[in-house]
Image: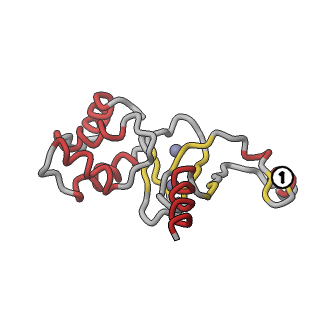
Amino acid sequence: MRTPDELTSRFRAQGLKVTPQRQAVFRVLHGNPTHPTAETVHQAVMAEMPTVSLRTVYQTLNDLAEMGEISRLEVGTGSGRFDPNVEDPHHHLVCDSCGMVRDLHVEFAGIEVGDHLVSDELPPGFTVSGAELVVRGRCAQCGEFAALAEAEI
Ligand SMILES: [Zn+2]
Ligand SMILES: [Zn+2]
């Protein structure tokens, strides 16, 4: 993702309004590895600017996604997540319990699904343009909570 200053120039070049609220959204997203939801971004921006509306945050996120500055992810955690890391292609790891989303840097072709490698299962002549892998499970922290809850019963 571009820096908040670069995004400000790009927005202006596209004829889009740049307000201090929008710039706060840029800052929250920049270098953010947590794949936040619109609501999480809204909360973070409100810490700086209590009057910013969720609608403004949504609109800014949509504009950024349309410009290709961030990507929108659907990883089954209930609400859409936003990923500022668009330069570096990657997959995702999701905790089904707390909704944590992390980047996963793996080679897709070599991944075994069931007993087969993805690369071996492609029909002849099929040209791959992209592939997204979501690995689901439970993070270490959620695993510990589950173990504690069981121990207390
Ligand atoms: Zn978790
Ligand atoms: Zn990511």
- Specify the quadrant of the image occupied by residue 147: bottom right
For this rendering, which residue is in front, 138 or 127? 138
For this rendering, which residue is in front, 62 or 140? 140
Where in the figure is residue 104, as x and y percent of width and height?
A: 61, 43
Where in the figure is residue 151, as x and y percent of width and height?
A: 55, 64
Q: Residue furthest left?
A: 51
Q: Residue at x 64, y 39 (%)?
A: 105
Q: Amino acid at mark 1?
A: Leu
Q: Residue at x 47, y 58 (%)?
A: 98
Q: Residue at x 32, y 34 (%)?
A: 7
Read off the residue under disc 1. Answer: 117
- Specify the quadrant of the image occupied by residue 2: top left
Q: Is mark 1 within 8 Å of ligand 2?
A: no
For this rendering, which residue is in front, 14 or 145? 145
Q: Residue furthest bottom?
A: 153
Where in the figure is residue 54, as x and y percent of width and height?
A: 23, 58
Where in the figure is residue 33, as x and y percent of width and height?
A: 45, 40
Is residue 14 toward the left or the right of residue 134 in the image? Answer: left
Dot 1 lies on which element? strand
Is residue 44 toward the left or the right of residue 69 in the image? Answer: left
- Image quadrant for the N terminus? top left
Q: Is residue 152 above or below residue 94?
A: below
Q: Residue at x 53, y 45 (%)?
A: 102
Q: Is residue 144 above or below residue 15?
A: below
Q: Is residue 89 visible?
A: yes
Q: Is residue 29 above or below residue 57?
A: above
- Specify the quadrant of the image occupied by residue 53: bottom left
